[in-house]
Image (cartoon, helix red, strand yellow):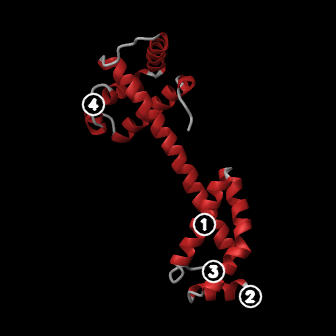
Amino acid sequence: MDDKELLKGIRQGREEAFKMLYERHYGVLCSVAQNYVGDSFMAESLVGDVIVRLWSDRQRVQIDRSLRMYLIRSVRNACLDYIKSQYHQREFAASEYIERSLHELYVGKSLPGSLLEKELENKIQEAVKAIPLESRRVFMMSRFHDMSYTEIAGELGISVNTVKYHIKQSLVIMRRELQEYTVEK
């Protein structure tokens, strides 16, 4: 059975076509995914999701060229989405940690009892000082004065996108300066 017949069988809901699709393409797709994500378990999971999605959307899926190329492209996109979500999760976790540490330091809820905490507080202060003045001002207004991006933009006479830019730059610097104190997941 060639890929056109296989696709026709899948559209008709024939389970033997689905099984053949799995047997014919699963290994190659896992190799593609493994090259992107570097984790065989996650690669298999992403490939499984792509194949199941093809099955559940079989009536609506438009495959103009080869089934294999469609599957490879779908796996590639799934891998890129996964990588992007992992990056955002790590970025969010690091930002949360930095914000929590900064908030405790500047609001005074932290009572440093150990040498490590004191060292971290000093490092955070140094990291904040490493932020360029305008970005630091925006960062402090956001993180320590609980002002929204819109409020900051209005007070400083800049756009909300400029505020976002300054916050992002500040977090990049904070992350870089505090990298020895953060834990990668």
- Please rate how many residues cluster around mark 4, counting C-alpha atoms within 10 Å: few if below 14, some from 14 to 19, many from 20: few
Q: In the rendering, at what x and y percent does residue 98 appear?
A: 43, 28
Horizontal and vertical percent position of residue 75: 63, 64
Q: Which amino acid is tagged 1? A: Gly
Tell me which label, 4 or 1, sits earlier in the chain.
Answer: 1
Residue at 30% in and 16% down? 108
At label 3, which amino acid type do we have? Phe
Tell me where residue 5 appears, x and y as whole percent: 68, 89
* Residue receiving disc 4: 146
Marks 2/4: CA–CA distance: 63 Å
| Disc 3 to disc 4: CB gap under 8 Å | no
At label 2, the amino acid type is: Met
At 34% from the left and 39% from the top, the residue drawn is 159
The quadrant the N terminus occupies is bottom right
10 Å crowding of disc 2: few (<14), some (14-19), many (20+): few
Q: Nearer the viewer, residue 95 or 131?
A: 95
Q: Nearer the viewer, mark 4 or mark 1?
A: 1
Label 1 vs label 2: CA separation? 22 Å
Q: Secondary structure at mark 2?
A: loop
How far apart marks 3 and 1 lie (CA) works out to 12 Å
Question: In the rendered structure, which disc, 2 or 4, sits on the residue that comes first in sequence?
Answer: 2
- x 51%, y 27%: residue: 173
Q: CA distance from mark 4 to mark 1?
A: 44 Å
Secondary structure beneath disc 4? loop
| Residue corresponding to mark 1 | 48
* Amino acid at dot 4: Asp
Alpha-carbon span between mark 3 and mark 4: 54 Å
Please state, as top left, top right, bottom left or bottom right, where the C terminus lies in the image.
Answer: top right
Is the C-beta separation of discs 4 and 1 under 8 Å? no
Q: In the rendered image, which residue does mark 3 sit on?
A: 18
Q: Is residue 94 above or below residue 89?
A: above
For disc 2, the marked residue is 1
